[in-house]
Image (cartoon, grey):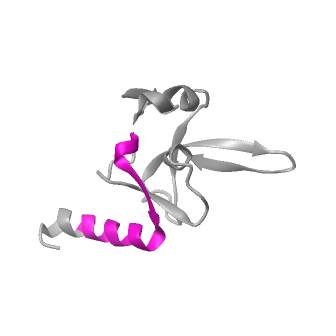
């Protein structure tokens, strides 16, 4: 396991085999969603596209080579733990179900 330092100083855990590929880029914290101040801070980078606006690429999606229409779940709910054993490709529906279940367990320890 190795650490990649983000521009804001936080560190992200990645597997040794992914380190060189990922460390070739500058990574930052990126909050997603309509209410960015409430969103989870994912490790992300920007990629310029000729004649178009740049796109944001999230580290966990790059590691898992996740196609459009699929999600990547952080099994331990730590979005700065991007080790492969902690990441799983899933459908959006399943990811939302898991997210709800994790929130219920944290709040009530019952769900």
Instruction: From this view, report whether residue 8 is shown above or below residue 87.
Output: above
Furthest residue toward right: 51
Between 55 and 66, the one lying in front of the other is 66
Between 39 and 15, the one lying in front of the other is 15
At 75% from the left edge and 43% from the top edge, which residue is drawn? 48
Q: Is residue 5 visible?
A: no
Instruction: Report the quarter where the N terminus lies.
Output: top left
100 magenta-colored: yes
Q: Quadrant of residue 96?
A: bottom left
31 magenta-colored: no
Instruction: From this view, report whether residue 53 is shown above or below residue 69.
Output: above
Q: Quadrant of residue 46?
A: top right
At 26% from the left edge and 64% from the top edge, which residue is drawn? 102
Magenta stretch, residue numbers: 81-103
Q: Percent x, y for residue 110?
A: 12, 72
**Quick check: 82 left or right of 98?**
right
At 56% from the left edge and 45% from the top edge, which residue is drawn? 62
Q: Is residue 84 visible?
A: yes
Q: Percent x, y for residue 35?
A: 49, 64
Q: Main secondary structure of the magenta part?
A: helix
Instruction: Report the quarter where the C terminus lies.
Output: bottom left
At 49% from the left edge and 47% from the top edge, which residue is drawn? 60
**Quick check: 83 left or right of 92?**
left
**Quick check: 17 left or right of 81?**
right
């Amino acid at each position: 396991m190795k650490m990649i330092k983000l521009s804001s100083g936080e560190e992200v855990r990645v597997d040794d085999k992914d380190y060189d590929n990922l460390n070739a880029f500058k990574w930052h914290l990126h909050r997603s969603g309509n209410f960015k101040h409430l969103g989870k801070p994912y490790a992300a980078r920007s990629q310029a596209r000729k004649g178009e606006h740049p796109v944001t690429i999230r580290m966990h999606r790059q590691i898992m080579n996740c196609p459009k229409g699929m999600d990547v779940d952080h099994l331990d709910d730590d979005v700065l733990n991007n080790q492969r054993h902690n990441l799983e490709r899933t459908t959006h529906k399943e990811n939302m179900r898991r997210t709800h279940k994790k929130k219920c367990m944290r709040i009530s320890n019952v769900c």
